[in-house]
Image (spheres, rainbow, N blue to C red):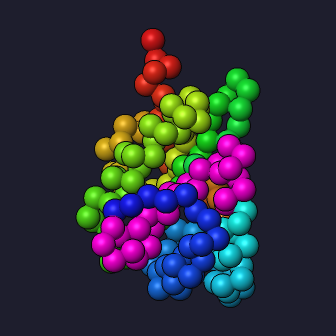
Amino acid sequence: MTLRVADEGSTVALHAYYVSNRAHLQPWEPARSSGFFEIDAVASRLRSMATQTATGNALHLLLFEHESGELLGDCNFTNVVRGPFQACHAGFSIAMDAEGKGLMREALTAAIPYVFKIMGLHRIMANYRPENIRSGLLLARLGFEKEGVARSYLQINGSWADHVLTSLINPDDLD
């Protein structure tokens, strides 16, 4: 697997990923209108992601299969807050056919040190729906600690959904 910073050059690949994994990702994401899946909308989001990454306000990464070049997923570190907080939110998704192969763990294991060392953040927060067992297990294996449950936290797939709140602290900041 190869991690690449999201940019407009990946429009066709990301469009194909969204279309082929639409039903697979639907239970875990906000409701998406048909316009979300249009290629021009994908290109526009990728331009925005590239700008956010370039300015240090986020890190948007795409996961590609090394040999075929197929886009297998994404991982993002967004909502960067500086000052005394120095934190962000992590989010990720992976293609249905790529689940259970350790690829997201590989991607996040590579990306997290960058967020801590290069971006200089202190805390990464990652939240997941309680029924998303795979995400919960992945975050636990990566060292994220459960901090609680937020009731009716995000509107996912058209309904308000509870989320388990987790975080990972920069190990260099621990005494």
- Camera-nearest residue between 143 and 51: 51
In the rendered image of this protein, does residue 115 appear above or below residue 132?
above
- Camera-nearest residue between 56 and 130: 56
Which x, y percent locates residue 125? 55, 42
The C terminus lies in which quarter of the figure? Answer: top left
Residue 63's quadrant in the figure?
bottom left
Q: Residue at x 49, y 74 (%)?
A: 25
- Camera-nearest residue between 160 and 94: 94
Judge whether residue 22 can be spotted in this image.
no
Which x, y percent locates residue 23? 49, 83
Q: Residue at x 52, y 68 (%)?
A: 28
Q: Residue at x 44, y 58 (%)?
A: 3
Count of labels in the image: 0
In the rendered image of this protein, does residue 172 appear above or below residue 5?
above
Q: Residue at x 28, y 58 (%)?
A: 102
The N terminus lies in which quarter of the figure? Answer: bottom left
Which x, y percent locates residue 111? 45, 46
- Camera-nearest residue between 140 and 130: 140
Which x, y percent locates residue 83? 73, 26
The single residue placed furthest to the top in the displayed view is: 175
Residue 5's quadrant in the figure?
bottom right
In magenta segment, residue 31: no
Judge whether residue 63 can be spotted in this image.
yes
In magenta segment, residue 61: yes
Residue 34's quadrant in the figure?
bottom right
Instruction: Please give the range of residues in magenta.
Output: 49-76
18 sits to left or right of 134: right
